Image (cartoon, rainbow, N blue to C red):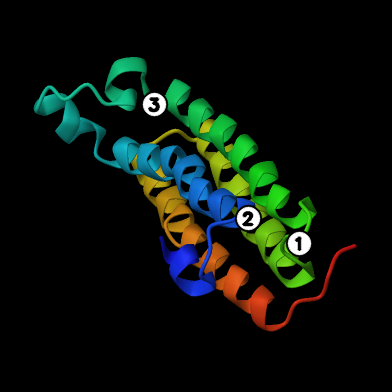
Amino acid sequence: AGWAAATGSMDLLGFLVGFLVFVWTPSHFWCLAMKIKDEYAQAQVPMLPVVIGMQKTSKFILGNTLILIPYSLILSIIPDGMGLVYTIIAIVSGGLMLVYHYKLTKNPTSDFAWKAYKVTAPYLTIIFVAVALDAAFHIPLF
């Protein structure tokens, strides 16, 4: 809706930007679920870390992030897509998430999940700022 309001139309790029929220959500939400796993267990809410454990959940988070990063870069390679500014920001912010989510698989604790969550939480805002900056200072990739 924001894309359509800003551009006056709903094109492929707008749809892909909107769908990015859907792809990002599991990595973000599962980190938070790992942080408060005990509360979910006590309330008998079958969240992923309660059902399959912290180690497996951390691997799901890493797997989702490995999907999210290339998906975010699709926005740079489609015709009339994002340019250099967006691409650099997407690579750096995605790389930071990847590092934290890989480390989470090595240390699948509530405390480290909270650290990973604090990296994942601003990712979407950073990506949306990158979209705006790219529109203002567009340098085509191709």
Which of 86/36 is in front? Answer: 86
Foreground label between 3 and 2: 2
- In the rendered view, tell whether residue 34 sits above or below residue 11: above
Q: Amino acid type of disc 2?
A: Leu
Which of 100/141 is in front? Answer: 141
- In the rendered view, tell whether residue 39 sits above or below residue 83: above
Furthest residue to the left? 43
Q: What element carries label 2?
A: helix
Image location (x, y in percent) of residue 89: 67, 66
Mark 1 and mark 3 in contact (Cβ < 8 Å)?
no
Residue at mark 1 to residue at mark 2: CA–CA distance = 8 Å
Q: Amino acid type of disc 1?
A: Asp
Residue at horizontal 62 percent and vertical 36 percent from the top: 67
Give the class, few, some or many, for how many residues have Cα within 10 Å of label 3's Cα (few <14, many ≥20): many
Question: Which residue matches tag 1?
Answer: 80
Residue at horizontal 40 percent and vertical 43 percent from the top: 113
Residue at horizontal 49 percent and vertical 52 percent from the top: 18
Is residue 42 shown left or right of residue 33? Answer: left
Question: Which residue matches tag 2?
Answer: 13
Is residue 13 shown left or right of residue 30? Answer: right
Give the class, few, some or many, for how many residues have Cα within 10 Å of label 2's Cα (few <14, many ≥20): some
Question: Which residue matches tag 3?
Answer: 54
